[in-house]
């Protein structure tokens, strides 16, 4: 019948309209039995209902308080979730996903710094743990809070080395002197030159502070 318009009599249309609430399988079986129409499929009747805008009373969603017909009924062995192939990918009791953010879990940020999950409430989400920069966390455990206006500078330029001895407390105003664009490119320098660059940067910063105080006076 593909490509051909299926005709229905007025009596058939009246019957189809009156019984539109039936499930499609029952709808089709009852119609073909009553009118002896072997040229009409269930798909044809389904399409007809849609064209006519006949509502079936079914949304395809569970209504509030509705109980699924299979509630409490275990899946037959070898079927659905109990199929051997499905069993292979199911979580076992007590198993955690590979991406579980457990206490002490570490990750590397997009800027190349190591972050660690600590036992502190996340102020943004309220979650019981939050990620912090590991080098800052380790340094503060050994030396106390970082003073205002200061930051930590990686001495060997390897941000993955979070040992407190590898991070120096410096004024933030020192960073432009150490940068690679307008400064002395501390991170791009050879290891034996880095201490010299740091000393020169500190000297420049000290001179600027003296000049600033003198100008203010």
Image (tube, rainbow, N blue to C red):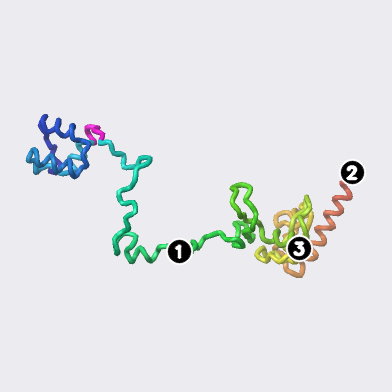
Q: Which residues are magenta?
A: 50-55
Marks 2/3: CA–CA distance: 38 Å
Residue 50 occupies which quadrant of the picture? Answer: top left
* Quadrant for the C terminus in the image: top right
Residue drawn at (73%, 66%) of the image: 166
Residue 184 occupies which quadrant of the picture? Answer: bottom right
In depth, the one of 24 and 159 nearer the eye is 24
| Res 173 seen here | no
In depth, the one of 1 and 77 nearer the eye is 77
Which badge, 2 or 3, is on the more N-terminal residue?
A: 3
**Residue 83 placement, left or right of 134:** left
Instruction: Examine the rendered structure and indicate whether residue 50 appears above or below residue 99.
Output: above
**Residue 178 placement, left or right of 64:** right
Residue 28 occupies which quadrant of the picture? Answer: top left
> Circle 3 is placed at which residue position?
142
Q: Position of residue 133 (x, y in %)?
A: 66, 58
Q: What kind of element bears circle 3?
A: helix
> Circle 2 is placed at which residue position?
215
């Amino acid at each position: 019948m593909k490509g051909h318009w299926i005709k229905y009599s007025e009596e058939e249309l009246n019957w189809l309209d009156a019984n539109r609430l039936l499930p499609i399988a029952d709808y089709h079986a009852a119609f073909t039995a009553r009118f002896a129409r072997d040229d009409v499929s269930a798909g044809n009747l389904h399409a007809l209902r849609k064209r006519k805008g006949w509502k079936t009373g079914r949304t395809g969603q569970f209504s509030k308080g509705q109980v699924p017909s299979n509630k409490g009924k275990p899946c037959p062995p070898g079927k659905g979730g109990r199929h051997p192939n499905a069993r292979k990918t199911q979580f076992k009791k007590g198993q955690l996903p590979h991406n579980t953010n457990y206490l002490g879990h570490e990750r590397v940020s997009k800027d190349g710094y190591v972050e660690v999950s600590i036992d502190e409430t996340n102020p943004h989400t309220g979650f019981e743990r939050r990620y912090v920069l590991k080098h800052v966390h380790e340094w503060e455990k050994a030396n106390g809070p970082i003073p205002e206006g200061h930051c930590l500078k990686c001495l060997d330029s390897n941000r993955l080395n979070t040992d407190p001895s590898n991070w120096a407390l410096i004024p933030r105003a020192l960073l432009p002197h150490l940068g690679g664009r307008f400064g002395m490119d501390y991170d791009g320098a050879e290891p034996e030159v880095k201490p010299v660059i740091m000393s020169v940067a500190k000297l420049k910063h000290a001179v600027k502070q003296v000049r600033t105080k003198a100008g203010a006076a």
